[in-house]
Amino acid sequence: MKLDRLIGILSVLLQQEKITAPELAERFEVSRRTINRDIEDLCKAGIPVLTTQGAGGGICIMEGYRMDRTILTSKDMQMILAGLRSLDSVSGSRYYGQLMEKLQAGSSDFVRGRDSLLIDLSSWYKDSLAPKISVIQDAIEERKKLSFCYYGPGGDSIRLIEPYYLIFKWSSWYVWGWCQERKDFRLFKLNRMDRVGKEEERFEAREIPMPDLSNERIFPGRVKVKAVFEAEMKWRLVEEFGPRCFEETENGKLLFQADYTDAGHMVRWLLTFGEKVKVTEPEEVRQELLRIAENIKKMYEKE
């Protein structure tokens, strides 16, 4: 990815007195023309990169600038490597691993101390996530449409989208794109996507702002729930909603209140607590839980 390459080139220039464009092109496995464009971008960002022609020429950062204004500190580099390492956890190739090697090459004095931040973005799904992420990244970079089968609450469907962003949020991976079926931007969860394929058809990028992924925008609270949990469930409430999501009652139980996007999702969540929770409001949720409990009872009684 371009940003990673720019960071890598900057790191090399900070560590070496001078390097040539062909050497950078070989190191980052791109063309010399791409390196020239990258150098232009670094200059536009305010970094004084100098290029000299002829024998003994090459690319370097202005000497005074390097001495007086250090761009990357040891801590900066540690954070960059931690970020690249986290991306490598869901990568289907050796790209990020190779980039880390390039950044670390010759910088042992610059990067001090042990790694203190380890991030694994793959969770339980690395084998299935990595191929999807690779295809989606390629489709975004090449501006090609993406097709897939999507499993949603309303049933299965075949979708064709213009992909714009790969997003990691709410502990899961998503792709944000223009859905041709809905004629609007939609967020699709990668774990619900199957048979992900990059189409040959290209698309013209739309003028769009960064997606608004605030909880209020994506998960607007429509249903208010009030429930009483057994004290032994405190750890789960704290883990999922924080330590201030409930009030302890005189008898030691936990009074919980929250807003949910839809009642169905709320009911499924409440069922995971079994008999350790009693809903007091709203009445329709109480009735739905009672109906499910009666159906479960009948199912087991038939056996």
Image (spheres, rainbow, N blue to C red):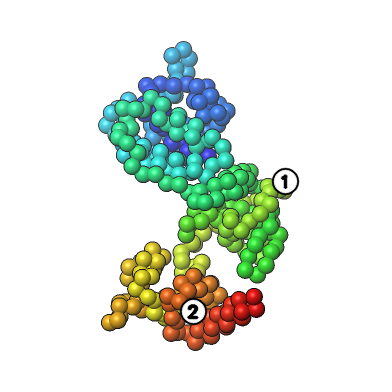
Q: Give the quarter of the image for residue 193.
A: bottom right
Residue 122's disc number: none
Q: Is residue 27 left or right of residue 137?
A: left
| Residue at image point 65% right, 62% down | 151
- Which mark's residue is nearer the viewer, 1 or 2? 2
Q: Nearer the viewer, residue 27 or 56?
A: 27
Say which mark, if any, is on residue 200. Answer: 1
Q: Secondary structure at mark 2?
A: strand
Name the residue furthest bottom. 283
The image shows residue 6, relative to residue 127, as above or below, that is above
In this rendering, would 130 be left or right of 220? right
| Image location of residue 96, percent across then percent down | 50, 37
Q: Which mark is residue 223?
A: 2
Binning the other alpha carbons within 10 Å of mark 2 as few (below 14), some (14 to 19) or many (20 upward) gives some
Q: How many marks?
A: 2
Question: Is residue 41 shown to the viewer in this render?
Answer: no
Amino acid type at image mark 2: Val
With respect to residue 171, does 9 lie above or below? above
Identify the secondary structure beneath mark 1.
strand
For this rendering, which residue is in front, 136 or 212? 136
Where is residue 136? Give x, y as percent: 61, 48
- Type of amino acid under label 1: Glu
Local crowd size for mark 1, using a 10 Å CA cut-off: few (<14), some (14–19), many (≥20): few
Residue at x-position 52% and y-position 22%:
22
Quadrant where the C terminus is found in the figure: bottom right
Residue 50 picture location, percent across and down: 41, 26
Q: Earlier in the sequence, mark 1 or mark 2?
A: 1
Point 57% across, 82% down: residue: 294
Give residue 218's position: percent from left, percent from top.
51, 66
